[in-house]
C-alpha cells in the first residue's frame, strides 16, 4: 500500500502539489469562515435535565437571554453621566427585539454603594433566531458604548461567545506569527539548509489549512467550541512538523546509499512512512475516544482533531514525497560518520538504563508518581471571566463589578422550572433553599424560580444547591438548569462514560501497537509508561492552574479548579502524542531486532538512531504549544501547558530512560507473541523492508 502511494505521488509530483495547493486555498479561504460560527456553549449535553429545561424555556419563555453593561470609573450620579445613561436606557428600550432594560438609578442594587459604577442589564426577546439576536446585540452594544465615561463595558450571554470567537482568531494569528518563524529557524539548525527546513513547514501549513477546513465542515452540522480552533490548529501544526521531520530525516539517510532521488523517496515512504501511518492512526484512535461522550463539545472536538491528524498524515505520505521527488535533488544527503560517533549521548543513556533496569525503572516511576499526586484533588468548573486575559472586555467588566459591588452580584442563578401540576408544598420547600429567590410565571402555567447561590455561578455552593433542589423535588415535574446544573450534569456524564472511553481507546491502541510491533508485551508496557507520563503532566497543570503555584509566571491565576475542557482534551491528545514518539523509537528498535535478533542491541541502536529525531520533534512541538500559550486564555493555557509538559516528560524521562530500562527487563521476551497471533501478524501486518546493515551504520548529522 505504501509503495503504491509513493509511486503515485512521485509519478506526477506537480499534479499532487497542485491538488494540495487547491486544498490550501480552500482551507485559508472557505475554512476561515469557522471563526464566525464558534460557540461558547461547552457544557451543554443533549438529553440531560439541564438541557431539557433550557430547551423548554427557549420555546415558552417570552424573556430571552441577557447581556450586561457596566459604566464606571467616575461618579455615576453626576448630572452629565446620569443624563447620558438615562438617554441610553430610553434608546435601548426602543430597539427592536429588546424585551426589558431597567433604570439603574431606580432599581435596587444596580448602582454601587461607592457611586463609582452602575450596571445596566439588557434582556432580549425570547425565541429570536441567530440573525435577529446578532442585530439586537450589535445595536445594544453600539448604543451603550456611546456613553462618555472612563469605563464602559458590555458582555455576557451570547455577546460573550462573539467576544471569545474574536479572541480565538487573534490568538491563532499571534501563535502562528510566533511559532512558524521559530520552527523554521530550529529546522534550519537541524538540517543545516533552508530547502530541507522548508519542507516540514509546508506540510505544517497544510495541517493548519486542514484544521480550518475540518472545523468549518463540522460547524455546518454541530456546534464548534471557541476552544476548538486553538487546539486543532496547535495540534495540526505540531504533528505536521513531527511527521515531516521524520520523513525528511529518513530521506537524507537514504540519499547516502542511492543517487536516484525518486528511489530514495520510495525507500523513505516504505520505511518511515509506516511509522507515520501507524502514528496517525494511533493518535486518531486516541481522539475518537471522545466520541463515547454525549457532549456535543467533546464529540465535535474528537471528530475535528482526528480529521486534522489524518490530514497531516496524508500530507506527509503524499505531498511531502511529491515535493521530495521534485526538489529533493537539491537537498544534501546526511553526512556519513562512524557509527560509534553517532547518537553517542542517546546510546549512553540506553546502555545506562539497560545495565541498571530495576533502579532506573523504580526511580523513574516514583518521580512520575510524585508529579501526578495533585491529580487526586482535581476539580473542574465551567469558569467565569477570570479565565480571560485582563485586556478583554468581558474580563474588564467582571473586574469592575467585583471591585464595586458585593460578592455574588451578576452571578447566574440556579434556574428551577416548575411544570404545571407541581405540588404547592414542593414549590415552597424549594423556595426555602434560597430566601431571595425570584419567581415569575410562564405561558401555560409553569413557574420559574431563580435561586441565588453564594459564591460563583458554578462554585461548590451553587452545585450543592442544584443537588438539594433535585433531592427536595422527589418525583414532582421539576427541572433544574443554569450554569451550575450544567456543570453537575457534565461531571455525571464524565463519570459515567469515562470508563467506556478508556476501554475503547486502549483496545484500539493495543491492536494497532500489536500490528506495528508483532508483540503483545510491548503494547502493554507502552500503555503503562504512557499513563505515568500523562499523570505527571496533568498533575503539574492542577498544581499550577487549580492550586495557583507559579500561575502568575504564565499570566494566569489559580482558579480553584480546571476548565472542564482541559482534562479530557489533555488526556486524549497527550496520550496520542506519547504514542507518536513511542512509535518513532520502536520503529528503529524493530528494524535492528529484525536484522540482528539481539534484544539489547535493538534497545541501544534503536534509541541511538531515533533519540535525536524524537528530541528535535519534541522541542518543535513544545515551541508550537508554547506559542499558543501567549494568548492568555486560561483553558488554552491549561491545555497548552499540559501538552507541552506531556511531550517533554515523555520525550526525555520516559522515552530516554524508562523505555530502554523496561525493554531491557523484558529482553527478547519483549518481541514475543503467541503463535496464532504471530501467524496473523506475518500474514496481515503492514511491514517495511528491513534496512541493510550498511544503511544502519550511519546516522543524520547537521549540515553547516
Image (spheres, rainbow, N blue to C red):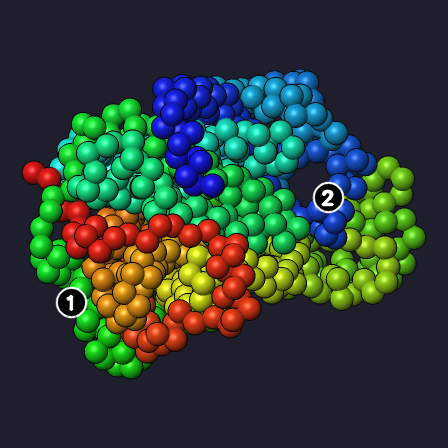
Q: Position of residue 78 (x, y in %)?
A: 46, 28
Q: Position of residue 407 (x, y in %)?
A: 51, 53
Image position of 518 (left or right of 467): left
In three-dimensional space, the C-alpha distance between marks 2 and 1, rounded to whole angstroms, equals 61 Å
Residue at 25% across, 25% down: 327
Q: Nearer the viewer, residue 559 or 19?
A: 19
Residue neighbourhood size for the residue with mark 2, other residues' Cα within 10 Å, grouped as few (<14), some (14–19), many (≥20): many
Q: Quadrant of residue 73?
A: top left
Residue ID for mark 1: 348
Q: Position of residue 228 (x, y in %)?
A: 49, 40
Asked if residue 283 shows in the view, the reply is: no
Q: Nearer the viewer, residue 358 or 456?
A: 358
For mark 1, give the secondary structure: helix
Q: Residue furthest bottom?
A: 358
Name the mark on residue 54: 2
Mark positioned earlier in the residue sequence (2 or 1): 2
Residue at 78% across, 49% down: 417
Quadrant that contains the C terminus: top left
For mark 2, give the secondary structure: helix
Q: Quadrant of residue 63?
A: top right
For the residues labelled 2 and 1, say whether their Cβ atoms are less than 8 Å apart. Answer: no
Image position of 326 (left or right of 529): left
Residue neighbourhood size for the residue with mark 1, other residues' Cα within 10 Å, grouped as few (<14), some (14–19), many (≥20): some
Badge nearest the viewer, 2 or 1: 1
Asked if residue 496 shows in the view, the reply is: yes
Image position of 256 (left or right of 164): left
Q: Nearer the viewer, residue 650 or 267?
A: 267
Amino acid at each position: 500500500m505504501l509503495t503504491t502511494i509513493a509511486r503515485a505521488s512521485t509519478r506526477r509530483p506537480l499534479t499532487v502539489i497542485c491538488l494540495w495547493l487547491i486544498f490550501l486555498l480552500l482551507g485559508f479561504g472557505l475554512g476561515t469562515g469557522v471563526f464566525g460560527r464558534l460557540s461558547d456553549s461547552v457544557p451543554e449535553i443533549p438529553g440531560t435535565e439541564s438541557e431539557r429545561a433550557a430547551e423548554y424555556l427557549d420555546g415558552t419563555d417570552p424573556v430571552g437571554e441577557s447581556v450586561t453593561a457596566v459604566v464606571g470609573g467616575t461618579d455615576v450620579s453626576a448630572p452629565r453621566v446620569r443624563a447620558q445613561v438615562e438617554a441610553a436606557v430610553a434608546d435601548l428600550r426602543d430597539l427592536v427585539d429588546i424585551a426589558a432594560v431597567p433604570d439603574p438609578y431606580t432599581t435596587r442594587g444596580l448602582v454601587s454603594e461607592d457611586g463609582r459604577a452602575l450596571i445596566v442589564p439588557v434582556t432580549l426577546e425570547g425565541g429570536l433566531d441567530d440573525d435577529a439576536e446578532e442585530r439586537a446585540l450589535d445595536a445594544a452594544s453600539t448604543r451603550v458604548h456611546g456613553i462618555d465615561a472612563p469605563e464602559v463595558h458590555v458582555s455576557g450571554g451570547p455577546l460573550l461567545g462573539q467576544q471569545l470567537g474574536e479572541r480565538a482568531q487573534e490568538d491563532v494569528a499571534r501563535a502562528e506569527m510566533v511559532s512558524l518563524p521559530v520552527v523554521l529557524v530550529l529546522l534550519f539548525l537541524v538540517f543545516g539548509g533552508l530547502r530541507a527546513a522548508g519542507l516540514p513547514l509546508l506540510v505544517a501549513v497544510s495541517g493548519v489549512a486542514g484544521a480550518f477546513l475540518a472545523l468549518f465542515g463540522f460547524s455546518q452540522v454541530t456546534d464548534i467550541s471557541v476552544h476548538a480552533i486553538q487546539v486543532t490548529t496547535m495540534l495540526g501544526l505540531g504533528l505536521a512538523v513531527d511527521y515531516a521531520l521524520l520523513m525528511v530525516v529518513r530521506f537524507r539517510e537514504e540519499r547516502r546509499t542511492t543517487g536516484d532521488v525518486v528511489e530514495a523517496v520510495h525507500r523513505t515512504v516504505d520505511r518511515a512512512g509506516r511509522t507515520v501511518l501507524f502514528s496517525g492512526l494511533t493518535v486518531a484512535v486516541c481522539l475518537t475516544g471522545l466520541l463515547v461522550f454525549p457532549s456535543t463539545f467533546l464529540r465535535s472536538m474528537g471528530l475535528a482533531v482526528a480529521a486534522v491528524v489524518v490530514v497531516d498524515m496524508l500530507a506527509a505520505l503524499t505531498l511531502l514525497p511529491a515535493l521530495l521527488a521534485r526538489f529533493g535533488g537539491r537537498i544534501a544527503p546526511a553526512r556519513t560518520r562512524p557509527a560509534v560517533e553517532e547518537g553517542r549521548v542517546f546510546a549512553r543513556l540506553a546502555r545506562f538504563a539497560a545495565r541498571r533496569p530495576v533502579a532506573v525503572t523504580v526511580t523513574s516511576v516514583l518521580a512520575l508518581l510524585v508529579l501526578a499526586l495533585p491529580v487526586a484533588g482535581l476539580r473542574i468548573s465551567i469558569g467565569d471571566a477570570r479565565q480571560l486575559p485582563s485586556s478583554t472586555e468581558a474580563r474588564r467588566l467582571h473586574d469592575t463589578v467585583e471591585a464595586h459591588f458585593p460578592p455574588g452580584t451578576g452571578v447566574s442563578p440556579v434556574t428551577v422550572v416548575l411544570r404545571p401540576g407541581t405540588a404547592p408544598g414542593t414549590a415552597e420547600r424549594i423556595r426555602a433553599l434560597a430566601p431571595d429567590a425570584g419567581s415569575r410565571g410562564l405561558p401555560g402555567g409553569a413557574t420559574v424560580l431563580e435561586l441565588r447561590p453564594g459564591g460563583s455561578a458554578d462554585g461548590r455552593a451553587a452545585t450543592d444547591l442544584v443537588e438539594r433542589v433535585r433531592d427536595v423535588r422527589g418525583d414532582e415535574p421539576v427541572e433544574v438548569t443554569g450554569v451550575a446544573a450544567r456543570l453537575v450534569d457534565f461531571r455525571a456524564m464524565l463519570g459515567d462514560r469515562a470508563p467506556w472511553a478508556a476501554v475503547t481507546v486502549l483496545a484500539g491502541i493495543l491492536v494497532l501497537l500489536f500490528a506495528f510491533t508483532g508483540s503483545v508485551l510491548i503494547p502493554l508496557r507502552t500503555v503503562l509508561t504512557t499513563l505515568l507520563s500523562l499523570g505527571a503532566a496533568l498533575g503539574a497543570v492542577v498544581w499550577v492552574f487549580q492550586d495557583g503555584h507559579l500561575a502568575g509566571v504564565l499570566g494566569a491565576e489559580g482558579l480553584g479548579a480546571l476548565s472542564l475542557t482541559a482534562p479530557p482534551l489533555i488526556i486524549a491528545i497527550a496520550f496520542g502524542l506519547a504514542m507518536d514518539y513511542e512509535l518513532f523509537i520502536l520503529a528503529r528498535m524493530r528494524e535492528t531486532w529484525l536484522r540482528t535478533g539481539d534484544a539489547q542491541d535493538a534497545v541501544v541502536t534503536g534509541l541511538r538512531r531515533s533519540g535525536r529525531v524524537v528530541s528535535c520533534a519534541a522541542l518543535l512541538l513544545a515551541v508550537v504549544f508554547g506559542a499558543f500559550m501567549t494568548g492568555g486564555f486560561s483553558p488554552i493555557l491549561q491545555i497548552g501547558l499540559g501538552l507541552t509538559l506531556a511531550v517533554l516528560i515523555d520525550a526525555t524521562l520516559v522515552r530516554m530512560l524508562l523505555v530502554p530500562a523496561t525493554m531491557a527487563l523484558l529482553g527478547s521476551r519483549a518481541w514475543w507473541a503467541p503463535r496464532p497471533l504471530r501467524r496473523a501478524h506475518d500474514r496481515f501486518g503492514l511491514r517495511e523492508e528491513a534496512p541493510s546493515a550498511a544503511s544502519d551504520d550511519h546516522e543524520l548529522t547537521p549540515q553547516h
